[in-house]
Amino acid sequence: MYIPSHFKISDTQVAFDIMKENSFATLFSQHDGMPYATHLPLLVDNDQQSLYGHFARPNAQWKDIEGQPILAVFHGPHCYISPSWYETKTAVPTWNYVTVHVYGQVELLTQEDEVMESLQEMVAYYEAPNSPYKLEDIDDGYLAGMSKGIQGFKIKIDKIEAKAKLSQNILLPDRNVS
């Protein structure tokens, strides 16, 4: 990713926070010699320096992803910036945004307990704290049947790049600070 120095986020914890707050990511790999992308939620494990997720088994991306370099893109807040917002009339439109790119390798989860633990963590993360829904309340047979339709995976993080292009290069009087 192209990152001018004034847009670079160097603090890894800030990057992890962005990933947690914007956890619906795009996962890129190669499939049959072509770029392939899947949009899916990814959970961050700071301690393990890993991401966790699940493919739908009919999605062919998981079948040859193991061992190849991947890219996961987390899109944070973004918006169009109009030149009409600036005091100066010598300006062009731009786009402000926050994004994190994660590079790594996928390991498919083959143990049923690993997959179930990952599913429980995902449900716990996304369900409201006071939600009556609990994955452990679902009939074991039903859950076992449904879990056959997914392929769990773990991404070991090799590299993180993070960028916040938020008009830092614009003079303060011209920034729309409200």
Image (cartoon, rainbow, N blue to C red):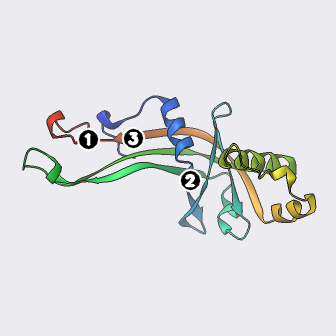
Front residue (pair 91, 176) = 176
Contact check, label 2 and label 3, Cβ < 8 Å: no
Q: Could one spot residue 110 in this view of the protein? A: no
Q: Residues within 10 Å of mark 2 (few under 14, many from 20)?
A: some
Q: Residue at x 54, y 50 (%)?
A: 72
Who comes first in sequence, dot 2 or dot 3?
A: 2
User: Which numbered circle lies on residue 70?
Assistant: none
Please name the residue that numbered disc 2 is placed on. Answer: 24
In percent of width and height, residue 111 lies at 85, 49
Q: Residue at x 67, y 30 (%)?
A: 47
In percent of width and height, residue 129 lies at 69, 42
Q: Residue at x 92, y 62 (%)?
A: 141
Real-space Cα distance between discs 3 and 1? 12 Å
Please name the residue that numbered disc 3 is placed on. Answer: 163
Please name the residue that numbered disc 1 is placed on. Answer: 167
Q: Nearer the viewer, mark 3 or mark 1?
A: 1
Q: Is disc 1 placed on a helix, strand or loop?
A: loop
Give amino acid for label 1: Ser
Question: Position of 8 compared to 176: left or right?
Answer: right
* 145 vs 166: above or below: below
In percent of width and height, residue 17 lies at 53, 36
Q: Residue at x 26, y 41 (%)?
A: 167
Q: Is disc 3 placed on a helix, strand or loop?
A: strand
Question: Position of 2 compared to 63: left or right?
Answer: left
* 20 vs 108: above or below: above
